[in-house]
Image (spheres, helix red, strand yellow):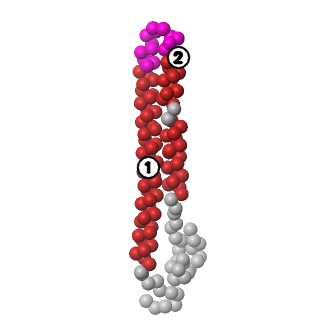
């Protein structure tokens, strides 16, 4: 943000006060984080399945194994849903950054034609 004490503003006109400035950096970093989480979750389901297969082979025919299998399947669905949600979130965050940039450019272009009075000029 520019300092409020800068009366000239960005174009040397009489605009006073801070300017709102933003960039796509935070949106893109958040999208990258969501993608990293989705990637990190990728092998979890197969690792859980592999660990569970070893447990099933060594446990014989215990009655708790059916419940354990149901719990494992529930967790696998949750991991898949989380991975999918992270991928969707990353795409949405990138879309926000693109839209925000396009909006900024449209506003900048539309304001370029507006005359800005200089200090000391009458209206």
Disc on the earlier residue, 2 or 1: 2
Element under label 1?
helix
Circle number at residue 21: none
Residue at image position (51%, 31%) is 44
**Residue under circle 2?**
54
Q: Estimate the x, y position of residue 23 in percent, counting from the top left.
A: 52, 62
Q: Which image quarter holds the N terminus?
A: bottom right
The residue closer to the viewer here, 34 or 7, is 34
* Residue 60 drawn in magenta: yes
Q: Nearer the viewer, residue 72 or 18?
A: 72
Q: Is residue 65 above or below residue 33?
A: above
Neighbor class of circle 1 (other Cα within 10 Å; few <14, some 14-19, many 20+) is some
Residue 109 horizontal/vertical position (percent): 42, 74
Choose between 28 and 7: the one closer to the eye. Answer: 28
Q: Is residue 83 covered in magenta? A: no
Q: What numbered label is drawn on residue 91?
A: 1
The crowd level at tag 2 (other Cα within 10 Å; few <14, some 14-19, many 20+) is: few
Q: Residue at x 45, y 37 (%)?
A: 82
Q: What main secondary structure does the magenta stretch of the protein show? A: helix
Q: How far, Cα to Cα, is label 2 from label 1?
A: 37 Å
Pick out the residue farthest to the top.
Answer: 61
Q: Secondary structure at mark 2?
A: helix
Q: Which residues are magenta?
A: 55-69
């Amino acid at each position: 943000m520019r300092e409020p004490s800068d009366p000239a503003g960005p174009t040397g006109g009489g605009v006073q006060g801070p300017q709102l400035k933003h960039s796509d950096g935070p949106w893109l970093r958040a999208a990258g984080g969501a993608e990293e989480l989705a990637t990190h979750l990728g092998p979890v389901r197969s690792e859980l399945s592999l660990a569970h297969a070893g447990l099933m082979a060594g446990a014989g025919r215990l009655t708790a194994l059916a419940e354990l299998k149901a719990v494992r399947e529930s967790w696998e669905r949750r991991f898949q849903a989380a991975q999918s949600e992270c991928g969707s979130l990353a795409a949405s965050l990138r879309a926000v950054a693109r839209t925000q940039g396009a909006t900024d450019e449209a506003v900048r272009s539309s304001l370029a034609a507006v005359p800005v009075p200089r200090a000391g000029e009458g209206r």
